[in-house]
Amino acid sequence: MSDLIDRPESALSSTLYRERFLSVVESGQATWPSVERRRGPRRRLDAHDRLDRRATEIPAAPILVPAQASSPVRRDRHVAGYRKTVFTIDIGGAALAAAAAQLERFGAAAGGYSSVYWWGVLLLPALWVMAVGASRAYEARFLASSAEEYRRVINAAVGLAAGVALISYLSKAQFARGYVIVALPTCALLAVVGRYFARHSLRRARARGRFLQEVVVVGHEWPVLDLVAELRRNPDSGLRVIGACVPGGRGSRQMAEAGVPVVGDINQVVQAVMRLRADVLAVTTCVEFGGPELRKVCWALEKTDVDVVVAPSLIEVAGPRLHIRPVARLPLLHVEKPEFTGGRRIVKGTFDRVLAVVALSLLSPILLAIAVAVRMNSAGPALFRQTRIGARGVPFTIYKFRSMTADAEARKSELTLLNDNADGLLFKMFRDPRVTAVGRFLRRYSLDELPQLINVAKGDMSLVGPRPPLPSEVEQYADDVRRRLLVKPGVTGLWQVSGRSDLSWTDSVRLDLRYVENWSLVWDLEILCKTVFAVFRGAGAY
């Protein structure tokens, strides 16, 4: 039996499982027999890999599941610290918002009935904290982890405003509308901005290796490696993999190269978690570790502080598109379709155009000064025009401040062999001799891209979206990469806040496709805020 199970997938394996199924039916058993099925990833191993697996094999430990495990010392104290920080931000921001509303509506010398509103400095913080708590924005799973925290804060502001309106209507109380209109939006704005800076400080600490939760991953080798790679690409997630439990408890050359130690078999998960004092147990796709096995592990860890998370094989699908829906008493994971049309798209387009027009009006003196500097620095026009491909493959003319010499396109063929981004279609040089002195400064702080606001106002581009590609690039796109053309290209995007020109072609495509599949208005606002910091840092721009 063991010899048959260890063989590669073939007709023999289907015969084996048919016999097992018939034996279960004939015997009337209520559960499937617990037979270890040692199937690794579907790939052919060469002699070197087989030798490596034997060399790194870990001796099997007794298959025991403790009835109750003791709680390890938690290392995620930063969650409690972050909660205290945002709690303080909420109280202080609400008090400031109440004071600002009082001064705006009634003035500093107000007296009589209007002086009653000074009590709002004490009342609004209490109401705001209760509203945020009711929206569950203080829960650990939302704190400093995703845009869901911001969304719940905004929901709290909307709910509090609705509550004030309802109480005013039912009690016939006359609240000063100007006071409410100033206080609640200001309160929400201060809460969101305060959280952003608190998160930024936490991200910097995590990038230095602090405030990280240690994770043990369960599953087959390739899903485990995919999850490890994704967590390492996003260190601000606060998760660090310290070991993996794989079927058979055997390591491989790929696992060793990735720096992921194999700490046990899938039947030794609880022992591995307790031995390594892990904070999180992450379960990836694994046939052998199904519902019954996961339930037993959850029972064994329920008296501990260890978090158990399930990582489906949908790494590039964001949380808002995933919903658990009970069907026939089964918790099915429903994946919503990407939204490329509809009301939210109209709202996004309107927001983009209005903000672009406002920005062009406010920045017009700076735009004029840059244009003069470009003309004085080198011969040629101030604006650079180039054909790019927009949504649905429609070409358009993009506008940028000229940062290179006038004959830059003619000289490009001479520099092809010096391309620093040789892994894809993009042409990038760290020290491009065609870039002018003024152009180098403009590129460092992305000032050369400001005229793209004209494209946004015209409707050719969005403020946030994939990088606008050249026609020559689009001609070489694979079918999956063409999904970048389902939305309008953006002035900024995930590529802008994740490394800019330092990114490889593969990473640029991955980030663009992630945005296309999972875009949202809240995510757009988050990317716009991150763009400001990325521009001032100037990293990855050349």
Image: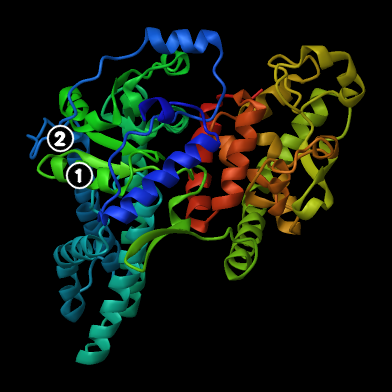
Q: Residue drawn at (65%, 36%), measured in percent from left and top?
A: 509
Distance of label 2 from label 1 (alpha carbons): 8 Å
Q: Nearer the viewer, residue 383 or 206?
A: 206
The image quarter containing residue 372 is top right
| Three-letter residue code for mark 2 | Val
- Give percent across and percent down for residue 211: 26, 29
List the residue tagged with mark 2: 65
Q: Could you tell me which quadrant the N terminus lies in?
A: top left
Report the colour scheme: rainbow
Residue 296 marker:
1
Q: Nearer the viewer, residue 463 or 357?
A: 463
- Give percent across and percent down for residue 136: 25, 59
The 10 Å Cα crowd at callout 2, few under 14, some 14 to 19, many 20 or more, is some
Residue 262 marker:
none
Q: Residue drawn at (72%, 24%), measured in percent from left and top?
A: 438
Helix, strand, or loop for circle 2?
loop
Q: Residue drawn at (60%, 37%), measured in percent from left and top?
A: 510
- The reply to whether callout 2 and callout 1 are in contact (CB within 8 Å) is yes
Q: Is residue 191 visible?
A: no
Q: Could you tell me which quadrant the C terminus lies in?
A: top right
